[in-house]
């Protein structure tokens, strides 16, 4: 019986999943496949032999997919809170037509709930009829966002990027406490200081790409690392990390500049000791921590998100100081933010019952920015409620400028002294909101709103349809991103010219309808001189 016939018969029999080990036509298929409308019968020609074993993918539309490929050993048992280890080799051919489990996380609008620590998988998407041995296609490696607590690789369908002649790789990496908990007991038993395991996973995935992407037709010398939000922060962190040197040739940072100062190792380890005591490990031992149930870890981890720490190995200094001194991996960079980043977070607070009012506006500035009453009063004077349609929009403007826009300018100014740097602002005020329901104010160009212009998004709670003008903007953005992946320059004859940032006039590409254009007022629009004065 042919493999395709086996798949059809099994699915007609309404089996939800096929057995994990199947012998078909003399080929051992390792792994499982989900039946249903999304399950595509793989073509026998789509077999690629990786350094760990052969994988068999499927053609979906005009794209060839290889899903759920392990790039590291499951970080379970004694490997929990340790640097990622190489995956086990397999014999036969592994069926690579379903995603691996996403990393442990609570349910949210930004990721599906999971309890599986066996989650270090990546996915390879290439154009149909690619030659596996050609080795000349640019490669784009995507890091998802989610405050380092939520998210998964399989939410981002890159078909429209792949159509531009690039290979796209998406990955899972350890999240939350499992990915970023620092603790002295863990440092004693690992290969270095504790914490930053998620960043180490990303580097392991990049090493896998370097060693294997040529077998899929990709050029390991043309790897672009790109990510959004916590994924953008991860890209910045990999720019600064000595361990990522040589693993990528270009970088794109979307809304990742919300913190350029990772926490100190001492601060991170103190938080880890507090976590251990709360989670049921008063002896603060590594053995107790590694025996905790995943559900317990998720219950007591910091739901507000994590930041990398300066552990002396993965990160040896703050991102801001690394970029200012030139002590980072010198590759061309695109870096940008959205015009109304903070509106998403103000909306989330309002939806959970913590709205901004005229009465609490100043106190919310103080708490959200963690500043003194005197500084909060200065901010209110700069951002008076009378200048905004609602207190929510006023607070969102404060948070956007302080936490995103002006840090982006700081990064632009530092990076551009050493590498070719392209600055952008996503400005479509009518972008559909895909993650949160309507609130009493417009979302505008909120945090994450640009994602739907690059990817076909899945698992988002709210549908969104782009207008004709927005589809044109999306096509231009995808051209910019993939042009940059090809030769490090986003411009081409088909899209508006985009010159590198030089600091003079703060040239920034405004990504807006009906046509992107250069703006020179980004810093003044976001009051960056003011924020520099009170930082």
Image (spheres, grey):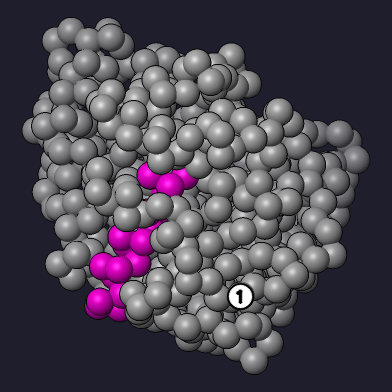
| Front-most of residues 435 and 496 | 496
- Residue furthest to the left: 188
**Identity of the residue drawn at 46% across and 38% down:** 383
The answer, for residue 119, to whether it is visible in the render is no
Q: The N terminus lies in which quarter of the figure?
A: bottom right
What range of the chain is rendered magenta? Answer: 399-419
Residue 436 x %, y %: 67, 33
**Identity of the residue drawn at 47% across and 63% down:** 522
Question: Would you say the magenta stretch is mainly helix, strand or loop?
Answer: helix
| Front-most of residues 175 and 443 | 443
| Front-most of residues 160 and 450 | 450
Residue 32 x %, y %: 65, 43
Q: The C terminus lies in which quarter of the figure?
A: top left
- Describe the element under mark 1 as helix, strand or loop: strand
Residue 20 x %, y %: 62, 41
Residue marked by disc 1? 517
* Residue 244 part of the magenta segment: no
Residue 511 x %, y %: 61, 66
Q: Residues within 10 Å of mark 1 (few under 14, many from 20)?
A: some
Decide if residue 395 is on the left or right side of residue 269. Answer: right
Where is residue 56, by image quadrant? bottom right
């Amino acid at each position: 019986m042919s493999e395709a016939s086996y798949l059809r018969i099994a699915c007609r029999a309404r089996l939800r999943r096929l057995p994990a080990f199947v012998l078909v036509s003399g080929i051992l298929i390792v792994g499982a496949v989900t039946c249903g409308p999304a399950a595509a019968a793989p073509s026998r020609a789509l077999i690629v032999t990786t350094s760990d074993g052969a994988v068999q993918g499927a053609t979906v539309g005009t794209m060839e997919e290889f899903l759920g490929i392990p790039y590291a050993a499951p970080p379970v048992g004694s490997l929990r809170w340790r640097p990622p280890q190489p995956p086990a080799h397999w014999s036969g051919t592994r069926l690579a037509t379903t995603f691996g489990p996403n990393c442990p996380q609570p349910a949210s609008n930004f990721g599906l709930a999971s309890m599986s620590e066996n989650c270090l998988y990546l996915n390879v998407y290439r154009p149909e009829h690619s030659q596996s041995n050609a080795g000349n296609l640019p490669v784009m490696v995507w890091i998802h966002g989610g405050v380092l607590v939520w998210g998964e690789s399989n939410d981002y369908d890159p078909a429209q990027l792949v159509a531009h002649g690039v290979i796209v790789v998406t990955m899972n990496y350890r999240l939350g406490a499992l990915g970023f908990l620092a603790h002295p007991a863990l440092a004693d038993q690992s290969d270095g200081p504790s914490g930053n395991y998620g960043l180490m996973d990303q580097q392991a995935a990049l090493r896998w790409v370097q060693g294997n992407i040529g077998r899929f037709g990709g050029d390991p010398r043309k790897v672009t690392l790109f990510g959004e939000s916590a994924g953008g922060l991860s890209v910045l962190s990999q720019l600064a990390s000595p361990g990522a040197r040589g693993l990528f040739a270009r970088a794109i940072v979307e809304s990742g500049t919300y913190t350029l100062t990772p926490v100190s190792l001492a601060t991170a380890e103190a938080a880890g000791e507090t976590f251990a005591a709360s989670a049921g490990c008063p002896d603060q031992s590594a053995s107790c921590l590694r025996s905790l149930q995943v559900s317990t870890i998720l219950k007591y981890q910091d739901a507000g998100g994590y930041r990398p720490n300066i552990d002396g190995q993965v990160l040896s200094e703050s991102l801001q100081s690394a970029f200012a001194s030139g002590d980072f991996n010198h590759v061309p960079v695109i870096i940008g933010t959205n015009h109304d980043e903070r509106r998403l977070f103000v909306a989330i607070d309002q939806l959970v019952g913590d709205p901004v009012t005229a009465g609490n506006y100043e106190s919310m500035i103080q708490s959200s920015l963690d500043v003194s009453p005197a500084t909060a009063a200065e901010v209110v004077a700069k951002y008076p409620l009378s200048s905004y349609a609602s207190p929510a929009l006023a607070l969102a403007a404060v948070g956007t400028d302080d936490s995103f826009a002006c840090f982006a300018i700081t990064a632009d100014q530092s990076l551009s002294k050493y590498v070719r740097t392209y600055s952008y602002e996503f400005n479509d005020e009518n972008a559909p909101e895909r993650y949160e329901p309507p609130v009493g104010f417009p979302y505008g160009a909120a945090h994450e709103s640009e994602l739907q212009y690059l990817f076909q998004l899945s698992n988002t709670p709210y549908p969104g349809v782009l207008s004709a003008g927005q589809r044109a903007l999306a096509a231009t953005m995808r051209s910019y991103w993939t042009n940059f992946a090809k030769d490090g320059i986003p411009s081409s004859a088909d899209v508006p010219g985009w010159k590198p940032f030089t600091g003079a006039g703060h040239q920034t590409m405004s990504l807006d309808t009906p046509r992107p254009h250069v703006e020179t007022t980004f810093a003044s629009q976001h009051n960056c001189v003011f924020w520099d004065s009170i930082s």
